[in-house]
Image (cartoon, rainbow, N blue to C red):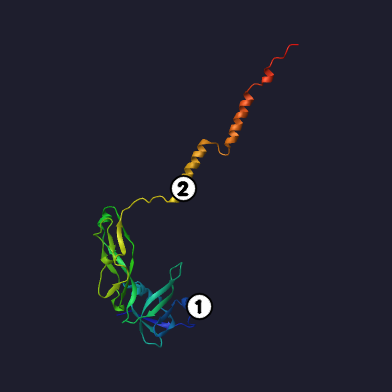
Amino acid sequence: MPEVVVTKPREGKFNKNAARRVRAAGKIPAVLYGPGHDPVAIEVEPKQISRILFSETGHNTIFDVEVAGQSAAKAMIVDLQREPINDKLIHIDLKRIAMDKVLHVKVRVKLHGIPEGVKSGGILDQVMREVDIECLPADIPGHFDVDVSHLELHQVLRVSGLPHSEKFKYLNSEEATVAHVATIREEAPTAAEVEAAEAAAAAAATAEGATPGEPEVAKKGGKAAEDAAKKPDAAAKKPEAKK
């Protein structure tokens, strides 16, 4: 049985103060929209929305939404906002879904198994955690399961290696990389790091060859003055002439 979300029209409609009052009452302000209908400001129960988001199909779940005074409609969660500090849901967007119309959705890719390349010292890098597909609402997969235990070092899992079916179409390139097994290697230093190391080495060499704060010219001048002071005065040594 599909999930049924019972909603209530929101007083004040799209007014921000009205949305704050809804949150203060423990509900989530939301908007329901779709082709052929005007957007409706509603409030929903947090438990119902959480149950949908944490289900197997997650945000791709198709459910029935009931609004007072209107017939039930198929809908799905297309956008949501969370409070940045405690991650609490503060607003959601619901979209009416026509079951005979193709949808563009994102589906998770779950990797299973330990690749042979990892056993040899490599690491598994999952580049793409979701793929884009097109299908009818009833054919949306909960996720794609892929066994990667056969992957050796430097081997790649591409979109072409994911499960395929006539019920859906991948919008990503078949050659797009989903995951690969890479070798672990030390990262080369950046240009800035090399420049900083060279500057430090040059500063150390300068410090070893000269006293800090003493200019070379002053050193030379000081030596000449010291030699002149030690040299005896020629005039003082000259014997006095006889009269």
Q: Position of residue 210 (x, y in %)?
A: 54, 36
Say which residue label 2 marks.
195
Name the kind of residue labelled 2 in the image: Glu
Quarter of the rendering containing residue 217: top right
Mark 2 or 1: the one toward you: 2
The residue lying toward the viewer, choosing from 191 and 21, is 191
The relative height of residue 101 versus residue 197 in the rendered view (above or below) is below
Question: Is the N terminus in the top left, top right, bottom left or bottom right quadrant?
Answer: bottom left
Name the kind of residue labelled 1 in the image: Lys
* Mark 2 vs 1: CB contact within 8 A: no
Residue 138 numbered tag: none
Question: Is the C terminus in the top left, top right, bottom left or bottom right quadrant?
Answer: top right
Q: Position of residue 71 (x, y in %)?
A: 37, 87
Say which residue label 1 marks.
16
Residue 194 in view here: yes
Quarter of the rendering containing residue 91: bottom left
Mark 2 or 1, nearer chain start:
1
Q: Which structural element holds mark 1?
A: helix
Q: Residue at x 64, y 25 (%)?
A: 229
Q: Residue at x 36, y 84 (%)?
A: 73
Q: Which structural element holds mark 2?
A: helix
Q: Residue at x 66, y 20 (%)?
A: 234
Category of crowding for the residue at label 2, using alpha-carbon neighbours closer than 10 angstroms: few (below 14), some (14–19), many (at least 20) = few
The residue lying toward the viewer, choosing from 218 and 110, is 218
The relative height of residue 110 versus residue 76 in the rendered view (above or below) is above
Q: Outermost residue toward the top?
A: 243
Q: Position of residue 46 (x, y in %)?
A: 40, 75
| Image-based side of 29 in relation to 120, left or right | right
